[in-house]
Image (spheres, rainbow, N blue to C red):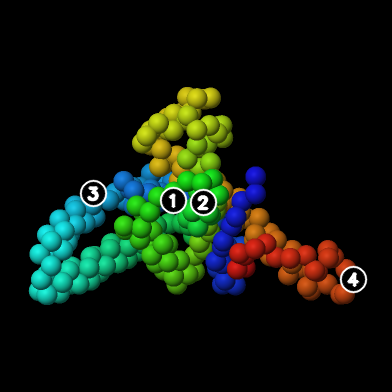
Amino acid sequence: MFVMVQVEVDKEVEKKAETRDVKVVGIDRGIKNIAVLSNNQFFNSAHLKDIKGKNEYNRKRLQHAGTRSAHRKLRELSGRERRFVLDINHVISKQIVNLPFNVFALEDLESARMRTKRNGKKFNHKPGSWSPYQLEQFIRYKARDMGKAVICVNPKYTSQKCSKCRYADKSNRKGPIFHCNSCGFELHADLNASRNIEILGKSEYFRLLSTSQSLRSDESMPTGMGEDSSKPIPSGAGI
């Protein structure tokens, strides 16, 4: 199966990765849980939903009023909500990148969006209510500042595949529970997805790292030696 990968690894990160054990954590983003990590850590959205619910009630009340004062308060409400979401994403991203991992694997939300469009399905915009893309951006720049790497993998089948035996089937997932119809393995569905993301992220990270090292080795050889230097670097590789 072809896997789309986006990786941010600068020279300093790559140098560190060559001299220490690489520890990868998978991160699944969703609705009920803002983020679920493959190390069993959950960041739920209960507080976020509570605040947004109150804001939505006040927004409808002000829209119904329709006065100039109400419009001003609506703008203020929108500003407070944006700052609230921004603060949550800052806090969560900081907690994540401070964990003892040096590679963070995330699902590529854009590839998921394009797949649902091709299948004629309406893309679920609910994650946008808490800005998962903003969370990803914060994780990226915070990780980069700490000399860590971020990889995005295609999330196709990550919610259907068993992270233990690798059997994939739509019927494996039943709401918030994942139960493998092959080996009987059972756990929280988002946690299972995050473990699949970790597996994909780890495989692609080392593949891209190996490709980068091979390309540098070829560049150091005299012309005509080594593999074809015209071979393209994998799309999205920042190594």
Do callouts 2 and 1 mark residues in contact (Cβ within 8 Å)? yes
Residues marked 3 and 4 touching at CB (< 8 Å): no
For label 1, the residue is 123
- Work out whether mark 2 precedes mark 4 in sequence or the reverse, and give the earlier one: 2
- The secondary structure type at the circle numbered 2 is helix
Q: Amino acid at mark 3?
A: Ala
- For the residues labelled 3 and 2, the Cα–Cα distance comes to 30 Å
Q: Nearer the viewer, mark 1 or mark 3?
A: 1
Amino acid at pointer 1 = Phe
**Closer to us: 116 or 12:** 116
Question: Are the residues flagged by discs 3 and 2 in contact, CB closer than 8 Å?
Answer: no
Q: Which labelled disc corresponds to residue 224?
A: 4
User: Residue 190, how many percent across, how many down?
Assistant: 40, 42
Tell which circle, 1 or 4, labels the residue nearer the N-terminal end.
1
Viewer-proximal residue, 237 or 59?
59
Name the foreground residue: 116 vs 112.
Answer: 116
Query: Looking at the picture, how far across and down is residue 105, in whole percent?
Result: 50, 55
Q: Nearer the viewer, mark 2 or mark 4?
A: 2
| N-term-proximal mark, 2 vs 1 | 2
In the figure, residue 13 lies in which quadrant? bottom right
Lower sequence index among marks 3 and 2: 3
Residue contact at pointers 2 and 4, CB within 8 angstroms: no
The residue at which mark 3 appears reads as 46
Q: Are marks 1 and 4 in contact (CB under 8 Å)?
A: no
| Crowd tier of the residue under label 3, counting other residues whose Cα lies within 10 Å: few below 14, some 14–19, many 20 or above | few
| Residue at the spot of label 2 | 117
- Marks 1 and 3, Cα distance to the nearest angstrom? 23 Å
Task: Give the Cα separation between the discs numbered 2 and 4.
Answer: 45 Å
SS assignment at label 1: loop
Q: Which amino acid type is shown beneath numbered disc 4? A: Gly
Left or right: 27 in relation to 82:
right
> Is 27 on the left or on the right of 64, as rendered?
right
